[in-house]
Image: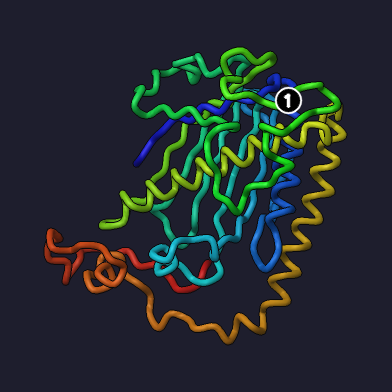
Amino acid sequence: MLMKEYRVCMPLTVDEYRIGQLYMISKHSCEQSGGGEGVEVVRNEPDHHPKYGLGQVTEKRIYLSSKLPSWAKLLVPRFFYVVEKAWNFYPYTITEYSVSLIPKFSIRIETRFENNNGSNDNVFGDKPTPVADVSYLDILNDPIPEKHYKESEDLSRWKSSKTGRGPLEKDWRKNHTPIMCSYKRVQCSFEVYGLQTRSEEFLHRVIQDILLVGHRQAVAWVDEWHGLTLEEVREFEQTMQEKTNSKVKSSQNNSGTAASHRPVFSRSISVTDERSLKKMGVTTSAMPDLSVPSSPMRLNSTPE
C-alpha cells in the first residue's frame, strides 16, 4: 500500500469552499460524462456519524475504461466501473474507491479543510505524515495535462468580479488573504504480484492531476457559485445529477449494438500466470514457480 499526503491551497475560506466543492464536483461530473463513460450517482442522502455528526453519504459508479493505460486494459473488460463511496462531514470527508472484479484494488482518501496555507503537520490528529510523503500541489504553477488546460481556468489570468480576487501571482501562497488548505491523506493499494508498484504509482499520478484540475476549477468558477446557500447548491447538485445520469445511460444504451461486435477476452487473465505477465511487460525472472498456485486470483472478463 502506497500512502501520501497532498496539500492543496486555494484563495478561499473553508466556509466558502463548502459551497464551491459541491458545485465543482457536480458540474465537472456532468462535463466528463458522455460516450458511455462518466459518473452515475446511485445514492445521495443525509447520514449521521456518531463521531462526526450530520453529513451526506454518496455512492457513484465511475465509467472510465478508455482512460486506463494499455497495461491496465489487459486486466479489465472494455466496459467496467469504479465504485466511489463518500462520507461528507465537512470539514472532514472520507472517500473510498473499489472495483468489484478486482478485490485487491482500493483507494481511500481522508480530507480535512483548514484556514491556513498548509502549515499543519498533524492535521488528522493521529500522527504526522513523514515529510518525504507530503506533497504540496500548487494550483497556479504546477503543470496539468494539456488536454485539461482551459484559458478560462488559468489562474494567472483569472479575475473574480464577485470577490475581487485574482489573478494569482507566483508566490501567492505566502501572502494571499484569504487562504485555505485541502489536506488529503491518500492510500492506494493494488496487491497483485508483479503489478503493485507500477499500478500504485500510476494511481497517485492520476490523483495528483485530478486534485490540481478540480481545485483550479473550484477557484476559476467562483463567480458561478459564490453567494449560493447550501440549499441552493444542493438543488443544483440534484439537477446536475439527473442530467449526468441521463447522459451516461443514454450513451450506454446507444452503444449497446456496437459493443456486441467488439472483441471479448477468450479467457480470464490470471495475474499469477507467468505468460500473461510477460505479455504485459512484467519481468518474471525472479518469480518463483507459479505453475500450481495454491489459490489463484482470476479476474472475470465481464463485470459483476
**Residue that lies at the very extreme toward the bottom in this rendered image:** 261
Which residue is depicted at the point 61% across and 22% down? 113
Vertical arrangement, residue 245 with respect to residue 232, above or below: below
* Residue situated in front as seen by the camera: 270 or 244: 244
In this rendering, would 159 be left or right of 147? right
Q: Is residue 37 visible?
A: yes
Instruction: Residue 289 in the image: state x and y as whole percent.
Output: 12, 66
Instruction: Residue 112 in the image: state x and y as whole percent.
Output: 57, 24
Instruction: Residue 193 in the image: state x and y as whole percent.
Output: 26, 56
Quickly name the residue at label 1: 166
In this rendering, would 249 be left or right of 72? right
Which residue is depicted at the point 73% across and 66% down? 249
Q: Secondary structure at mark 1?
A: loop
Please tell me how crowded label 1 is: few (under 14), some (14-19), or many (20+) other residues with Cα within 10 Å: some
Vertical arrangement, residue 114 with respect to residue 201, above or below: above
**Given the image, on which type of amino acid does mark 1 rest?**
Gly
> Where does the N terminus fall, quadrant-wise?
top left
Instruction: Residue 15 in the image: state x and y as whole percent.
Output: 73, 20
* Residue situated in front as seen by the camera: 195 or 242: 195
Quadrant hosting residue 61: bottom right
Q: Tally the marks.
A: 1
Which residue is depicted at the point 42% across and 38% down? 187
Vertical arrangement, residue 210 with respect to residue 275, above or below: above
